[in-house]
Image (cartoon, rainbow, N blue to C red):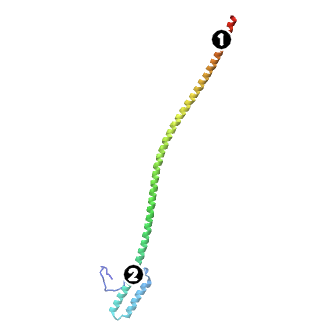
């Protein structure tokens, strides 16, 4: 036994107090019962009684220590199991974090690519708008040219008709002139 200062004190050899909730009522009862039976048996010799009390105290103390040792081993086993579970959870969590980081990098890469493609799309849209304006201008120029061509063809046709008419008239005049000549002659 140790006193309050932490030094060994063998003057009183009582077993340490047992807590019924921890060690069970039967052990406490059995220990004190054994102590009282031994005391009655050697009540005449105080040194024997003291020795027996010390012996019972040490037996109770050693059984208590053994039980505490077993409890500690069980607790250590539980802690090892919990530690393994926590390590497994940490490993799973780390894999999830790595997967999340990979997905995040993919998203960032896709966002950059999307931004570049949107820029290209705007450029091409502007080019298409510019080309559409040119096409409309060319179409209106083509319409004007078509109209001018049709007018020119119509004028050419009219001139050809006039030339044909003039040629016929000229021929008629020559025929008429030569006929008159023959008549006059």
Q: Which structural element holds mark 2? A: helix
| Quarter placement of the N terminus | bottom left
Q: Which mark is residue 66?
A: 2
- Outermost residue on the bottom side: it is 44
* Residue 66 in picture, x, y percent from top left: 39, 81
Mark 2–mark 1 Cα distance, whole angstroms, equals: 155 Å
Residue in view at x 34 percent, y 92 percent: 48
Q: Nearer the viewer, residue 111 or 54?
A: 111
Q: Quadrant of residue 12?
A: bottom left
- Looking at the image, residue 49 sits to the left or right of residue 104; the answer is left
Residue in view at x 48 percent, y 46 percent: 117
Name the mark nearer the viewer: 2 or 1. Answer: 1
Q: Which mark is residue 115?
A: none
Q: Quadrant of residue 158?
A: top right
Query: What residue does disc 1 label?
Result: 174
If you read the primary sequence from the N terminus, does the residue marked by circle 2 or circle 1 appear first? 2
* Residue 19 in picture, x, y percent from top left: 41, 81
- Please report contact status of discs 2 and 1: CB closer than 8 Å, yes or no: no
Task: Tell me the crowding category of disc 2: few under 14, some 14 to 19, or many 20 or more residues within 10 angstroms, Cα based.
Answer: few
Q: Which structural element holds mark 1? A: helix
Residue in view at x 41 percent, y 78 percent: 71
Above or below — where is 91 with respect to 34? above
How many labels sit on residues? 2
Q: Nearer the viewer, residue 100 or 171?
A: 171
- Outermost residue on the right side: it is 183
Task: Tell me the crowding category of disc 1: few under 14, some 14 to 19, or many 20 or more residues within 10 angstroms, Cα based.
Answer: few
* Residue 96 in picture, x, y percent from top left: 46, 61
Above or below — where is 77 with respect to 138? below
Above or below — where is 136 with respect to 174? below
* Residue 110 in picture, x, y percent from top left: 47, 51
């Amino acid at each position: 036994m140790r006193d309050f200062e932490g030094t060994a004190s063998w003057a009183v050899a009582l077993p340490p107090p047992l807590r019924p909730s921890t060690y069970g009522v039967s052990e406490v009862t059995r220990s004190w019962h054994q102590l009282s039976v031994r005391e009655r048996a050697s009540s005449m010799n105080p040194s024997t009684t003291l020795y027996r009390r010390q012996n019972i105290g040490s037996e109770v103390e050693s059984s208590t220590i053994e039980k505490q040792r077993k409890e500690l081993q069980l607790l250590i086993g539980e802690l090892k199991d919990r530690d393994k579970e926590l390590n497994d959870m940490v490993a799973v969590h780390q894999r999830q974090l790595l997967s999340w980081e990979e997905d995040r990098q993919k998203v960032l890469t896709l966002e950059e690519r999307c931004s570049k493609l949107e820029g290209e799309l705007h450029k091409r849209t502007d080019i298409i708008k510019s080309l559409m304006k040119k096409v409309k201008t060319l179409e209106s120029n083509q319409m004007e040219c078509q109209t001018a061509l049709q007018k020119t063809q119509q004028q050419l046709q009219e001139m050809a008709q006039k030339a044909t008419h003039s040629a016929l008239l000229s021929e008629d005049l020559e025929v008429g002139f030569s006929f008159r000549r023959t008549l006059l002659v």
